[in-house]
Amino acid sequence: QVQLVESGGGLVQAGGSLRLYCAASGVTFSNFVMGWFRTAPGEERDFVATIKRSGEATYYASSVKGRFTISRDNAKNTLYPQMNSLKPEDTAVYYCAAEANQDVIAVGASRYDYWGQGTQVTVSS
């Protein structure tokens, strides 16, 4: 059974950094494109970033480009979303997701097959 478990969220001041973790089990991690999404209060789920299977290509939403990075360690079955220069508008529940069908940059949430439970990130001003 596929499981994705996020951790690393919390409360941080504006301008600060957080590193999230997404640990996968029950899968061959390197077979999945991984995505990172967020849901702010009262908002739809938004794309944040994605990384291809081997990690050689990434793509970011314009709102986070230059501040957030996404990386992966396939040997450890772990995704590492890194958030720097955080802003209050980054406050959201953050989710990782796995896509099994094609090794492509995947932006749409509907492309993803498996989702974690989410981790709360709160940025205070």
Image (cartoon, rainbow, N blue to C red):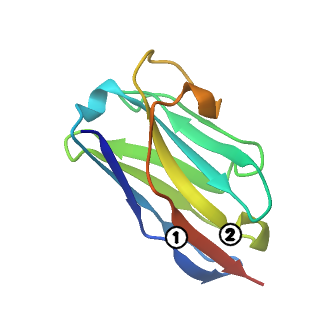
Q: Residue at x 39, y 23 (%)?
A: 100
Viewed as shown, does residue 123 lie left or right of 106?
A: right
In the displayed structure, 17 sits above or below 81; it is below
Pointer 1 residue = 18
Q: Are marks 1 and 2 in contact (CB under 8 Å)?
A: yes
Residue 12, quarter of the rendered image: bottom right
| Residue nearest the observer in this picture, 116 or 78 | 116
Viewed as shown, does residue 83 lie left or right of 115?
A: right
Q: Position of residue 48 (x, y in %)?
A: 64, 46
Helix, strand or loop under label 2:
loop
Q: Which mark is residue 86?
A: 2
Q: Position of residue 62 (x, y in %)?
A: 77, 43
Q: Quadrant of the C terminus?
A: bottom right
Helix, strand or loop under label 1:
strand
Mark before the other along the chain sequence, 1 or 2: 1
| Residue nearest the observer in this picture, 36 or 4 | 4
Amino acid tagged 2? Leu
- Cα separation, mark 1 vs mark 2, equals 8 Å
Q: Residue at x 29, y 39 (%)?
A: 2
Residue 123, quarter of the rendered image: bottom right
| Residue nearest the observer in this picture, 14 or 9 | 9
